[in-house]
């Protein structure tokens, strides 16, 4: 486990599934005192997030050391007059780092935070956890302003798929101790899995829940944004991936997640709701409103809110009550009135509560803590992002967004904490130490330790002043870099990559081709016989609304609601970098993974031929691709003189070098119809160098029998190749004779030999190169 100073805000807003998604979930407040988790649950979405895939050593846990900054933000947040809930545990386990905080910073996390919330009556704090490290919390007098919530499951699921965690029975015991000590508790029975005999396992779990009288229980079922990718990550990490066999083959009705089939979900949820005690408030976690309605479940709040009257709730009760006779139910959960002073038993004055002296803790620079630039009253001021491919993720959307958030952890080595959670001393760790926290005993025989790292370079570029050079061995690159490409529209657009599309203005059909690509991405359907991943799209266009409307009609996307458009004539004259920042922020808000700029020259004002300016224009796009995992498409007009793929686009060749994929759309010679040839250069072998396509009534289709360039290549080579073995020519000699480019000529020669159109002699080694000839009848 690593330690480091956090460089961005500790308090964030969850980005949410997006407005209009149909998912009942809200942009709740979350605190990020740490990242990652030493537990190794099979279904954990963190292991498949971009940041942790590139920084696997931080997946086991990262503890932040600048606690004075964190405490200052919380104090500022508590000044907001509107009552709110702050959650610890959405981006990490809420309690597992409590002993680590005591070891590293001298004060347990529970002591730092509970004291702040106990001194007021407006807001509440909730710790969400699978851990049982409650020793430090039990030292404190209880307060109704702090809730402890356990994620629990059937004993079979907990011991089989939640590797390294205390079994559910031990979590229930920890909850019992906290409840008897006077603390409010909640539970999340999530994810429910329909394993053989699930009824018995969940009946036992619900019986334990009822016995503890929690104020709320939130139900959820197994879900994943990309089951294939998450399964692969689990297998790579030595976790039992068979849990994903329970997922259905299609996304849910909202298109939000792959889940357990809906009828099975309903059966499990009804089973649980029928057995929960009447005094327990039930809720669903990140489920479609239609599921609430089918269950007849009224909305009275959910796990991360104060209750049904929370200020973040906007018509949720009415939304889920449609089609049922159940009226909206006001919250029955504690919603403290500002004028009340709810204090621990025996404490008559807030000053008597044992407050942690965070002000005495200097920041890492040794300076006194300054004012934190964060205003909780301004909800939109908090940055937030979404990472998973396709539509926004459940917790994962915001988790990895915050996990990636603008900086890459720098390693700060540490000391050791035993598996009991007790500390050898309460002295703060010094810079240069490594912290080790052991989780509960691991039943999995295929345990894989998170590899060590070293200092990480700042891949985003927002902390350039703090970045350092770093060299990598080939083995380190292989270990920390995913081999699988996450395609948005295979093989043309990939997550975290930049695609440049070139073509003659108003002739090549760039906008039409992109329009059809967008249409299929919005639907998650095949484009040019290849798969796409469903996601909203952000498109910046140089066209005006009147002309662009016609393209929308032609392509058939005039009524879609997840294509977000920006027109150049409506954009204020801001700096290009500001335009990109705004567009990326908007992508985060709507959950878009594809950003298109048509054209790059129009929006960035790149002077043609200027390498420096071209690189300045592309850097914000590279940062957006790296930080947010966006697939970015930038359109260029072809220069009048034309040229080969990569050379034909207007502007500096520096743009070509900065791109990952370059696609040039051209009309084939002597063709005036809807046939186009796609010429491509790519860092990915999946992208074909040439593809002939045709636009028809149903969109674009591949014309495999009309590979015009291949025919021209073969014709040129057949004319150049001699018809006797004695006169056979090498590939280099044939290229000199025909003027063909090396790569395409060699591909054509190999193909023609395989098809029997040419004969080949030689071994292909030094001194005996391949030589080519043909029969006189060819």
Image (cartoon, helix red, strand yellow):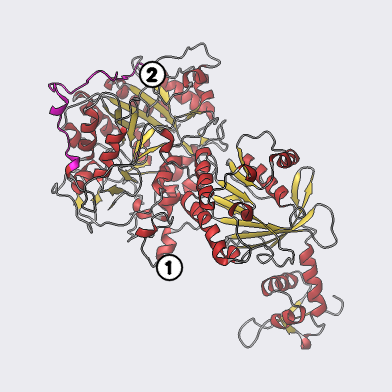
Asked if one can make out residue 491 in the rendered structure from this viewpoint, the answer is no
Residue at figure coordinates x 16%, y 46% from the top left = 423
Labels 2 and 1 touching (C-beta < 8 A): no
Position of residue 447 in the picture relative to residue 17 (left or right): left
Q: Which one is in front, 652 or 247?
A: 652
Q: Position of residue 406 (x, y in %)?
A: 41, 50
**Is residue 105 inside the magenta stretch?**
no
Farthest residue toward the right?
Answer: 777
> What secondary structure is found at the residue carrying circle 1?
helix
> What secondary structure is found at the residue carrying circle 2?
helix
Dot 1 alpha-carbon crowd within 10 angstroms: few under 14, some 14 to 19, many 20 or more: few
Q: Quadrant of residue 505?
A: bottom right
- Residue identifier under label 1: 474
Magenta stretch secondary structure, dominant? loop
Position of residue 249 in the picture relative to residue 635 (left or right): left
Residue at figure coordinates x 54%, y 17% from the top left = 322
Which dot marks residue 232? none
Asked if one can make out residue 573 in the rendered structure from this viewpoint, the answer is yes
Q: Position of residue 532 (x, y in %)?
A: 62, 46
Which stretch is magenta?
Answer: 331-359
- Residue identifier under label 2: 275
Farthest residue toward the front?
Answer: 573
Mark earlier in primary sequence (2, 1)? 2
Q: Position of residue 312 (x, y in %)?
A: 42, 26
**Is residue 346 inside the magenta stretch?**
yes
Position of residue 105 in the picture relative to residue 373 (left or right): left
Q: Quadrant of the C terminus?
A: bottom right
| Mark closer to the observer (2, 1) | 1
């Amino acid at each position: 486990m690593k330690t480091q100073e956090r460089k961005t805000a500790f308090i964030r807003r969850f980005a949410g599934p997006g407005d209009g998604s149909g998912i009942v979930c809200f942009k709740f407040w979350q605190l990020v005192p740490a990242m990652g988790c030493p537990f190794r649950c099979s279904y954990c979405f963190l292991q498949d997030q971009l940041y942790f895939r590139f920084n696997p050593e931080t997946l086991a846990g990262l503890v932040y050391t600048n606690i004075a900054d964190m405490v200052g933000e919380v104090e500022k947040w508590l000044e907001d007059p509107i009552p709110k809930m702050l959650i610890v545990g959405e981006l990490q386990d809420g309690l597992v780092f409590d002993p680590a905080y005591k070891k590293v910073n001298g004060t347990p996390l529970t002591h730092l935070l509970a004291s702040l919330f106990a001194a007021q009556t407006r807001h509440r704090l909730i710790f969400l956890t699978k851990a049982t490290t409650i020793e430090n919390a039990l030292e404190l007098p209880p307060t109704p302003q702090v809730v402890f919530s356990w994620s629990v499951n059937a004993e079979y699921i907990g011991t089989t798929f939640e590797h390294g965690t205390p079994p559910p029975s031990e979590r229930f015991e920890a909850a019992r101790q906290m409840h008897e000590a006077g603390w409010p508790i909640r539970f999340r029975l999530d994810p429910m899995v329909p394993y053989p005999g699930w009824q018995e396992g969940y009946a036992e779990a619900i019986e334990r829940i009822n016995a503890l009288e929690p104020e709320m229980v939130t139900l959820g079922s197994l879900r994943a944004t990309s089951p294939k990718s998450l399964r692969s990550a689990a297998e790579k990490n030595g976790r039992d991936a068979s849990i994903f066999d329970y997922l259905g083959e299609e996304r849910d009705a909202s298109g939000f997640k792959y889940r357990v089939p809906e009828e099975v979900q309903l059966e499990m949820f009804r089973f649980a709701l029928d057995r929960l005690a009447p005094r327990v408030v039930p809720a669903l976690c990140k489920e479609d409103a239609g599921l609430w309605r089918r269950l007849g479940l009224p909305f009275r709040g959910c796990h991360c809110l104060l209750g049904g009257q929370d200020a973040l709730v906007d018509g949720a009760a009415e939304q889920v009550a449609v089609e049922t006779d159940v009226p909206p139910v006001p919250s029955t959960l504690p919603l403290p009135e500002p004028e009340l002073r709810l204090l621990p038993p025996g404490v008559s004055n807030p000053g008597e509560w044992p407050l942690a002296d965070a002000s005495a803790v200097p920041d890492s620079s040794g300076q006194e803590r300054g004012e934190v630039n964060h205003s909780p009253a301004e909800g939109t001021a908090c940055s937030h992002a979404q990472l998973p491919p396709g539509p926004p993720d459940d917790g994962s959307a915001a988790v990895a967004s915050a996990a990636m958030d603008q900086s890459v952890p720098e390693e700060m080595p540490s000391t050791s904490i035993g598996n009991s959670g007790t500390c050898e001393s309460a002295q703060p760790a010094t810079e240069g130490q490594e912290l080790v926290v052991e989780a509960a005993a691991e039943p999995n025989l295929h345990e894989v330790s998170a590899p060590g790292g070293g200092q990480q370079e700042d891949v985003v570029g927002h902390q350039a002043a703090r970045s350092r050079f770093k060299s990598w061995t080939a083995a380190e690159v292989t270990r920390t870099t995913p081999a699988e490409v996450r395609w948005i529209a295979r093989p043309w657009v990939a997550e975290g990559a930049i695609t440049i599309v070139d073509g003659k203005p108003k002739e090549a059909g760039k906008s039409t081709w992109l329009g059809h690509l967008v249409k299929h991405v919005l639907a998650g359907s095949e484009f040019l016989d290849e798969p796409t991943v469903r996601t909203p799209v952000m498109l910046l266009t140089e066209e005006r609304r009147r002309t662009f409307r016609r393209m929308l009609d032609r392509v058939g996307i005039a009524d879609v609601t997840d294509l977000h458009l920006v027109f150049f004539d409506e954009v204020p004259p801001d700096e290009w970098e500001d335009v990109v920042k705004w567009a990326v922020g908007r992508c985060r808000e709507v959950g878009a993974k594809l950003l298109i700029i048509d054209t790059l020259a129009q929006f960035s004002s790149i002077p043609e031929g200027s390498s420096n300016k071209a690189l300045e224009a592309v850097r914000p796009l590279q940062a957006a691709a790296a930080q947010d995992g966006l697939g970015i498409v930038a359109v260029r007009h072809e220069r009048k003189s034309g040229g080969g793929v990569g050379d034909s686009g207007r502007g500096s060749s520096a743009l070509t070098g900065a791109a990952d994929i370059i696609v040039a759309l051209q009309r084939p010679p002597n063709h005036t119809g809807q046939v186009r040839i796609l010429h491509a250069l790519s860092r990915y072998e999946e992208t074909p160098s040439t593809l002939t396509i045709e636009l028809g009534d149903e969109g674009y289709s591949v014309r495999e029998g009309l590979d015009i360039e291949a025919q021209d290549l073969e014709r040129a080579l057949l004319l150049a190749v001699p018809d006797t073995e004695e006169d056979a020519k090498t590939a280099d000699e044939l290229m000199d004779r025909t003027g063909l480019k090396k790569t395409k000529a060699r591909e054509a020669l190999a193909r023609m030999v395989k098809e029997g159109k040419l004969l080949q002699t030689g071994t292909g080694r030094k001194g005996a190169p391949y030589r080519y000839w043909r029969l006189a009848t060819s």
